[in-house]
Amino acid sequence: MKKREKIPPRFHWTDVETVLLDMDGTLLDKHFDDYFWEQYLPEHFCLKHDISLEQARHELLSRYRKVESTLCWTDLDYWSVQLGLDIAQLKTGLNHLIAVHPYVTQFLHFCRNRGKKVYLVTNAHPKTLSIKLEKTAIGHLFDRIICADEIGLAKEEGAFWQRLEQRLGFDRATTMLADDTEKVLRSAEQYGMGLLIYVARPSSRKPVAYSTRYPSIEYFSELIPPPERQAEQLP
């Protein structure tokens, strides 16, 4: 299979006024989420229902697909009711796997020092957000944090961006959006968002996969001009 060619970001920071950033897979290592939904939760589900782990995975995957790209997919209360398990409690018990990607904190400081408005915009449920911000302590670096639950739509839906713009008052032509989900970037593109960045390394445990449609980065250090880039050790 031919490896996808990387489309590098090309823009001037003077053209950017607002920075919108996704959380899971973009700022935080998606390994936590992948492990939770694909391994940890099926283990608890199979024990509760006295079925095999493979049966549990099959059953849960089918349920995931039915609500993918909707608010239900990230709604911990929804899953707690559906599965008869305390999902928030299970996530908290696994919080040692929650981690910020390399260079993220450096990038957030860079944006703030440049006078950009920086917003965290996530599909994550408020309970998930609380667990992750408590663990990572990066919440103070944003001008505001918006959950899709507050907007009433998932980011994959085009009307989400109109409601978000009305709430935050940004100019879509001078706004950067970074996300690890192409469907989200496509909905923002259709709305007329000015600068879209695809995060090609959402999980530290999976191979990098560039977008064929959007400029891609592996680390946020790629968006910081070299003179302002400071050395940071990879974990």
Image (tube, rainbow, N blue to C red):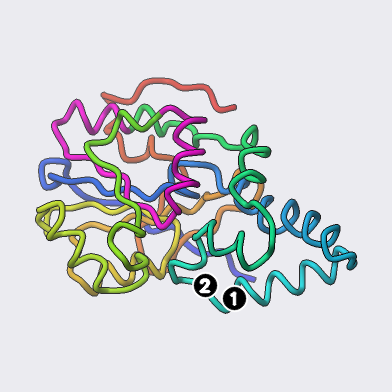
Is the residue 203 above or below the residue 196 in the image? above
Marks 2 and 1, how far apart at CA: 5 Å
Give the SS element for disc 2: loop
Q: Is residue 89 left or right of residue 44?
A: left
Q: Is residue 230 magenta?
A: no
Quadrant placement of the C terminus: top right
The kind of secondary structure element at disc 1 is: helix
Q: Which mark is residue 90?
A: none
Picture residue at 30% right of the left edge, 30% below the top: 141
Amino acid, disc 2:
Glu
Q: Please, what is the three-letter code of the amino acid marked with disc 1?
A: Arg
Residues 17 and 227: in front is 17
Please state if 6 lies on the left or on the right of 15 as rendered.
right
Taking depth in this image into account, of 16 and 167 the one nearest to the observer is: 167
- The residue closer to the viewer here, 3 or 222, is 222
Q: Which mark is residue 65?
A: 1
Q: Nearer the viewer, residue 9 or 199?
A: 199
Q: Are marks 2 and 1 in contact (CB under 8 Å)?
A: yes
For the magenta stretch, what is the residue range? 108-137
For label 1, count other residues whose C-alpha is less than 10 Å away and answer few (under 14), some (14-19) or many (20+): few
> Does the magenta-highlighted stretch encompass residue 120?
yes
